Amino acid sequence: MGTLRVLVVDDSAYNRRTISEMLDSFEGVEVVGKAVDGNDALRLIEEIEPDLVTLDLEMPRMDGFTFLRLLMATRPTPVIVISGYANKENVFKALELGAVDFIAKPARIVTSDLRSIEDELRRIVDLTKKIRRSSLGPKGIGSRSGAFRSPSAPPIERGAPDSLIVIGASTGGPSALVEVFRSFPPHLPACVLVAQHMPEKFTTTFAERLDRLGGIHVREAAGTVELRAGMGLVCPGGRSLVVERDGDRLLAHVVSARPDDRYLPSVDRLFESAAEAMGERVIGAVLTGMGDDGARGAEALKKRGAKVLIESPETAVIYGMPSAVERVHAFDEIRPLKEIGPRLIENAQLWMRERLH
């Protein structure tokens, strides 16, 4: 790929200038336009056809959400949201509308601290060079008809799970996980554990968003949790989630990072511990993402007779993590995103029927 041409969209002149200066300092990157709001951005996109857009969500006239809807409907283009910590719910809405990743501003107000995001910006810009344009667009918008549940609804007390579903994802993962979780029925006989590469201040909000989709109850994991059927746990950012058998009980522990952890939360550590604790009664899924986190864990699952699914290159925003699993031949099926959830359910129900018979 030649020079990556970027459009910067932000209503703050200081932010536009600072983000542009950082981008222009990256090798192989050129800022070709700056826009003050969504209307201005759409006009410029028609003229300059950028390869990438950085987007502030809170802007006058046309906000970031309206801009994303129109952009993805007319000219799907990779979008990086650069937003404040205070707007966590808005970030996930933007990801579901088609943005590929996000960076948290150090403050909601205009501040010189904005330059602290430079390393993260460089990393994500490098990732966008590998994005499949055909996979861009809105995913997981809304909830299943009649399935929306109030966050205050009490969880249904269930027994130990017949099986474990473990899912790993990175770039493009939040919207992909929404699609998968929307398919889960309320009486899923499995417990679902998620390792999504994400900053720690966002995983609580992400778990709450998954919980509101209906189906199973989801929360951010904390401390030690006894696993139950119909439960979903999201590993907190900056930590890892490991599974352990304690007699008849199955426990999940939130643990600190190790010096050799290259990715957090670690998909490998989740998968390896699940394989040790539940063996063949684990169903793993590796969704979109850059890197090879999950490949070693998928090998551990396969050695214990477990099933492993990977998202197909046709739907994965970045076919990095699934490709790593494919290269080591540690998978059973390659499926498009819309089929991942139903296949996880089918495999979980097989283990339930095994117990009943």
Image (cartoon, grey):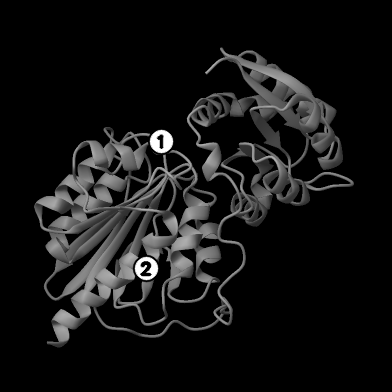
In percent of width and height, residue 220 lies at 44, 62
Going from N to C along the chain, the mark reached first, 2 or 1, is: 1
- For residue 342, which numbered disc appears in the image? 2
Instruction: Let me know if residue 227 appears in the view.
Output: no
Q: CA distance from mark 2 to mark 1?
A: 24 Å
Q: Which residue is tagged 1?
A: 290
Element at label 2: helix
Of residues 268 and 40, the one nearer the viewer is: 40
Q: Position of residue 12 (x, y in %)?
A: 83, 33
Number of residues whose C-alpha sits closer than 10 Å to that of mark 2, classed few (under 14), some (14–19) or many (20 or more): some
Expressed as whole percent of the image width and height from the top left, the position of residue 350 reads 21, 75
Q: On the picture, is 211 further left or further right than 166?
A: right
Tell which of 322 and 196 is nearer to you: 322
Numbered label attached to residue 64:
none
Question: Is 140 drawn above or below residue 321 in the view shown?
Answer: below
Q: Residues within 10 Å of mark 1 (few under 14, many from 20)?
A: many
Q: Is residue 146 left or right of residue 296?
A: right
The answer to whether one can see residue 197 in this image is yes
- Find out whether the residues at labels 2 and 1 contact each other: C-beta distance under 8 Å: no
Q: What is the quadrant of the C terminus in the image?
A: bottom left
Q: Amino acid at mark 2?
A: Pro
Name the residue located 48 percent from the left edge and 83 percent from the top edge. 154
Question: Dot 1 lies on which element?
Answer: loop
Q: Does residue 205 lie above or below 59 as drawn? A: below
Report the number of numbered marks: 2
Question: Which amino acid does the dot numbered 1 rest on?
Answer: Met
Please state which of residues 44 and 252 is positioned toward the viewer in this rendering.
44
- Tell which of 339 and 298 is nearer to you: 339
226 is higher (above) or lower (below) than 223: below
Which residue does the image show at 29% across and 78% down from the upper left?
189
Measuring from the top left, give residue 169's x and y in whole percent: 40, 48
Q: Quadrant of residue 165?
A: bottom left
